[in-house]
Image (tube, grey):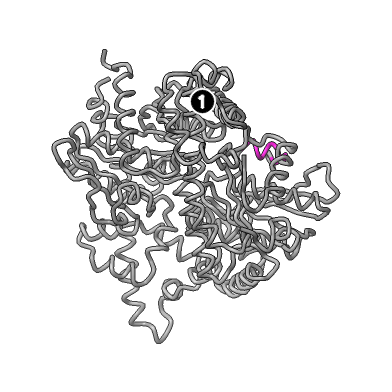
């Protein structure tokens, strides 16, 4: 099983790396490790984290910081920075950028409906992650941007989120709501007014009023948003942008990773690497046929109740799990081929400081492509 | 504590936990356990995930009920369905004679706008539907597989937020009814799930306090997944153990056994440290489900987990005693 590239080649060839995968697989930590490895290789990297566990944030010195890149001091020739995504601030920045003047920006930023959009519209977090990525990649002083994605099934929505958001902002119904008496669509308007009235009865008139005020304030800005969205989309499809899948070897997270691989394939994007965290070491003996298959489990049964029986049970458990994990991974590894597949054994402790992050980097970037862990 | 008493203490149990801790597996375990002691169970999935279907080897779940376990002499039966906000909203409007409105909402895309205009409405629609299912009395136990990640808190907090934000009308009524459900320990409890590792345990502790403080929902025992079963013999060196047993080890075998034992022992020690820490700061009973050393669960595994679950519940102190 030899692939034409290894993960370090992928790293060296990329200007942007997007880490995708489901929650709980060590995605944020992996993203940080990748950014650190780039710094060790003399590059200027920045990692955008979405929701880092507190200890990782501490390890990165990110506690209490906002969405501006903060330099992390370490013993490497390059530079590494990190930041946490702040969806609302990023969105606010976009509004300020495209507003005609300060008054328009204020009108939008103080609107209740806008507050809800910027906080909770499905896809907003994904969209802002890609917006932040674009900002850092194009306008920042970095030569590698590593971005973590939200731990949801919709994480790849940012691939179409720019379009979705601009579609949302551009929706005909809002235009009708905003200008209820505009000429030729009067008949539609009457119907829309009826819908609006019924809606107001169910959800309250305030809510509808806020929404209308928002779209009125937003008028004229859609185009700027749409153009920006297109440029973000182009960046994501450039050759220098690599999508890396992060998974654990459990059946359900492998299935989720497969789902992400499909989403990417649908979008015409190749997976450039697969990192599988939390692999069970199997303590294999080479060339020992007598200990292969279920022989170890057999011995555990025969010797049950003795210390040696316990020892065999332990080894059998490890191998059983390791085998099952490899079975689950087989299909996924094939699917992402020729992308390198890196198997990372379960780490004895969590990453609590930079040196632990560095050790994990050694494991990830020095792992052989064919696994062989333990 | 009598397992039947435990599983019927409230008709709704919401199973919550961060991604990757086996929340869906615990939901399935509870379902099998409850059905095996004669309770008719409904599993409600709020995210369209496939794992429940693959554990029971059935078709994908949908908005219509699907049978996961057929009622028989040893089982009262388990059904499962999804409850998604969009479907729940259409139901809600249809039940109030607003079919025409609901069609328009879909055709114009206004549904998205409403959901955006009123944060939490998606959650309230889902919980409102759960409340309706609870009231219908068709099932003895409704297990809700809550959204993953940090969403459990916002999911459950949506009711009080909405009741404040929308002061009159049907939405307010719906939110108030959901709030009544959540705050009544005889109708609804939350079971939090975690694995015995540092970050998941930290998050569980935070979630537990946050849910009690801001939602006022009753918390059941914590379910901890993936506990290594005790193996006392791992403390003995393989060479010594082999000599005791009169078994000759082949070259390298002792190293493999030693390596596996050392790895497992260090992981087990870490697990115990986390369980102890959790017990110290969180005064909730812990139900510890064993690691089955398989990376996918099927019906056999669920039966084993359900049996273990019932055994441990029976050992919990009786709250009325």
Q: Say which element carries label 1.
A: helix
Q: Main secondary structure of the magenta part?
A: helix
Residue A69 percent across, percent down from the top left: 73, 50
Residue reaching furthest to the bottom: A184
Horizontal side of residue A296 vs A246, given as left or right: left
Q: Quadrant of the N terminus of chain A?
A: bottom right
Query: Residue, x 37% and y 63% (percent of image)?
Result: B111
Residue A35 percent across, percent down from the top left: 72, 51
Q: Is residue A348 above or below residue A237?
A: above
Disc 1 target residue: A311
Horizontal side of residue B41 vs A227, given as left or right: left
Residue B183 percent across, percent down from the top left: 33, 33
Query: Residue, x 44% and y 71% (percent of image)?
Result: A174
Q: Quadrant of the C terminus of chain A?
A: top right
Q: Is residue B281 magenta?
A: no
Q: Is residue A60 magenta?
A: yes
Residue reaching furthest to the right: A77
Query: Residue, x 32% and y 18% (percent of image)?
Result: B315
Residue reaching furthest to the left: B73
Q: Which span of residues is magenta-colored?
A: A54-62
Rendered image quadrant of residue A224: bottom right
Q: Is residue B33 above or below residue A226?
A: above
Query: Residue, x 78% and y 46% (percent of image)?
Result: A71
Count of marks, rendered view: 1
Q: In this rendering, does residue A95 appear at all? A: no
Q: Judge by depth and name the residue closer to the eye, A154 or A228.
A: A154
Q: Judge by depth and name the residue closer to the eye, B247 or A314.
A: B247
């Amino acid at each position: 099983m030899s692939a034409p590239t290894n993960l370090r080649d992928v790293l060296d060839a990329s200007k942007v790396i997007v880490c995708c995968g489901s929650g709980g697989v060590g995605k944020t930590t992996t993203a940080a490790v990748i950014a650190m490895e780039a710094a060790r290789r003399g590059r200027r990297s920045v990692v955008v984290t979405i929701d880092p566990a507190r200890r990782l944030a501490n390890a990165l010195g990110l506690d209490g910081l906002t969405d501006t890149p903060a330099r992390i001091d370490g013993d490497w020739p390059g530079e590494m920075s990190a930041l946490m995504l702040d969806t609302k601030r990023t969105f606010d920045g976009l509004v300020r950028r495209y507003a005609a003047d300060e008054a328009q920006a204020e009108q939008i930023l103080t609107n209740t409906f806008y507050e809800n959009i910027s906080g909770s519209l499905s896809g907003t977090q994904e969209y802002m992650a890609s917006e932040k990525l674009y900002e850092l990649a194009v306008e920042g002083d970095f030569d590698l941007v590593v971005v973590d994605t939200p731990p949801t099934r919709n994480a790849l929505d940012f691939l179409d989120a720019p379009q979705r958001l601009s579609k949302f902002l551009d929706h005909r119904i809002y235009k009708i709501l905003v200008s209820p008496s505009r000429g030729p669509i009067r008949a539609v308007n009457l119907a829309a007014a009826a819908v609006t009235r019924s809606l107001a009865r169910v959800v309250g008139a305030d809510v509808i009023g806020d929404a209308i005020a928002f779209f009125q304030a937003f008028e004229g800005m859609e185009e700027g948003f749409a153009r920006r969205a297109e440029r973000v989309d182009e960046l994501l499809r450039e050759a220098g942008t690599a999508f890396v899948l992060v998974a654990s070897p459990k059946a359900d997270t492998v299935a989720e990773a497969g789902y992400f691989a499909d989403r990417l394939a649908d979008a015409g994007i190749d997976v450039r690497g697969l990192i599988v965290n939390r692999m069970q070491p199997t303590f294999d003996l080479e060339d020992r046929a007598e200990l292969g298959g279920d022989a170890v489990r057999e011995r555990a049964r025969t010797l049950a109740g003795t210390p040696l029986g316990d020892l065999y049970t332990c080894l059998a458990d490890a191998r059983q799990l390791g085998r099952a994990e490899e079975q689950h991974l087989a299909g996924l590894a094939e699917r992402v081929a020729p992308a390198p597949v890196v198997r990372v054994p379960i780490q004895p402790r969590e990453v609590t400081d930079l040196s632990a992050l560095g050790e994990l980097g050694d494991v990830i970037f020095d792992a052989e492509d064919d696994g062989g862990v333990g | 504590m009598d397992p039947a008493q435990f599983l019927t203490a409230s008709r709704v149990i919401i199973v919550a936990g961060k991604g990757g801790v086996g929340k869906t597996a615990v939901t399935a375990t509870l379902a099998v356990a409850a059905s095996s002691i004669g309770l008719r169970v409904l599993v409600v999935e709020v995210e369209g995930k496939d794992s429940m279907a693959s554990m029971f080897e059935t078709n994908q779940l949908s908005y219509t009920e699907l049978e996961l376990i057929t009622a028989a002499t040893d089982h009262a039966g388990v059904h499962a369905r999804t409850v998604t906000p969009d479907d729940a909203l259409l139901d809600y409007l249809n039940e109030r004679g607003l079919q025409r409105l609901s069609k328009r909402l879909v055709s114009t895309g206004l549904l998205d706008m409403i959901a955006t205009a009123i944060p939490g409405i998606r959650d309230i629609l889902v919980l409102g539907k759960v409340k309706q299912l609870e009231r219908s009395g068709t099932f003895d136990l409704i297990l809700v597989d809550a959204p993953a990640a940090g969403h459990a808190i916002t999911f459950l907090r949506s009711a009080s937020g909405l009741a404040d934000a929308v002061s009159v009308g049907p939405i307010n009524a719906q939110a108030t009814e959901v709030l009544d459900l959540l705050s009544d320990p005889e109708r609804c409890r939350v079971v939090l799930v975690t694995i015995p590792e540092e970050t998941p345990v930290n998050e569980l502790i935070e979630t537990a306090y946050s849910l009690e403080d801001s939602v006022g929902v009753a918390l059941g025992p914590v379910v901890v997944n993936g506990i290594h079963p005790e193996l006392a013999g791992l403390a003995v060196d393989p060479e010594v153990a082999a000599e005791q047993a009169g078994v000759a080890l082949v070259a390298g075998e002792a190293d493999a056994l030693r390596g596996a034992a050392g790895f497992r022992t260090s992981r087990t020690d870490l697990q115990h440290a986390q369980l102890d820490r959790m017990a110290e700061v969180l005064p909730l009973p812990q139900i510890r489900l064993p690691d089955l050393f398989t990376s996918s669960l099927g019906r056999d595994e669920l039966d084993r987990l359900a049996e273990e679950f019932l055994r441990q519940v029976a050992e919990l102190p009786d709250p009325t005693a």
